[in-house]
Amino acid sequence: MADKKSAQTSTQRIRISLKAFDHTIIDKAVKMIMETAERTGAIIAGPIPLPTKIKKFTVNSSTFISKNAREQFEMRIHKRLIDLRETTHATIEALTGLSLPAGVDIEIKMM
């Protein structure tokens, strides 16, 4: 009996980290991943919102005339983290076949 159970459920964990510039897109992607994992019977921990990284850029508006004329731009990178435990082979197949919205960077680590 123990052999059948170990064949169905693997003990490895999957850590999924998502990055995007728009928080609404990343939230949609997280919802899709969570629904897929719940359907296959995996235990979900998350989504954990990680701190938003803000990159700021300062550019001169007019390079030759006035040095004091500058514009500032910022880029916000939103991050989420999801841990999946007690995954099955069906969970891994469903996650690889999942089509996420454009603009979401996904990184999957198996532990």
Image (cartoon, rainbow, N blue to C red):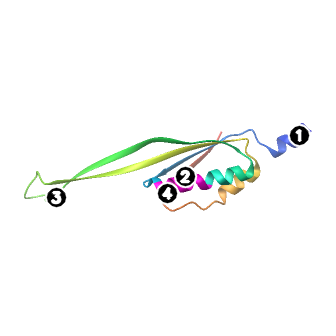
Q: Secondary structure at mark 4?
A: helix
Separation (CA) of disc 1 from disc 2: 33 Å
Give the camera-side residue of 30 and 103. Answer: 30
Horizontal side of residue 82 vs 50, given as left or right:
right
Identify which residue is drawn at 57% across, 51% down: 30
Separation (CA) of disc 3 from disc 1: 68 Å
**Picture quadrant of residue 98:** bottom right
Separation (CA) of disc 4 from disc 3: 32 Å
Residue 49: image x %, image y %? Answer: 50, 42
Q: Which residue corresponds to mark 3?
A: 61
Separation (CA) of disc 4 from disc 2: 12 Å
Give the camera-side residue of 64 and 80. Answer: 80
The numbered mark, 4 or 1, whose residue comes first in the sequence reads 1
The numbered mark, 4 or 3, whose residue comes first in the sequence reads 4
Q: Which residue corresponds to mark 4?
A: 25
Amino acid type for the residue under numbered disc 1: Asp
Q: Which residue corresponds to mark 1?
A: 3
Amino acid type for the residue under numbered disc 3: Ser
Horizontal side of residue 104 vs 5, given as left or right:
left
The numbered mark, 4 or 2, whose residue comes first in the sequence reads 4
Q: Secondary structure at mark 1?
A: helix
Queried whether the magenta region covers residue 39, the answer comes back as no
Q: Which residue corresponds to mark 2?
A: 106
Horizontal side of residue 92 vs 49, given as left or right:
right
Q: Counting other residues with Cα less than 10 Å from the Cα at mark 3, is it few (<14), some (14-19), or many (20 or more)?
A: some
Residue 58: image x %, image y %? Answer: 23, 50
The range drawn in magenta is 24-32
Quadrant of the snapshot with the C terminus = top right
Asked if the residues shown at circle 4 and circle 2 are in contact, with their CB atoms under 8 angstroms apart, the answer is no
Quadrant of the snapshot with the N terminus = top right
Q: Secondary structure at mark 2?
A: strand
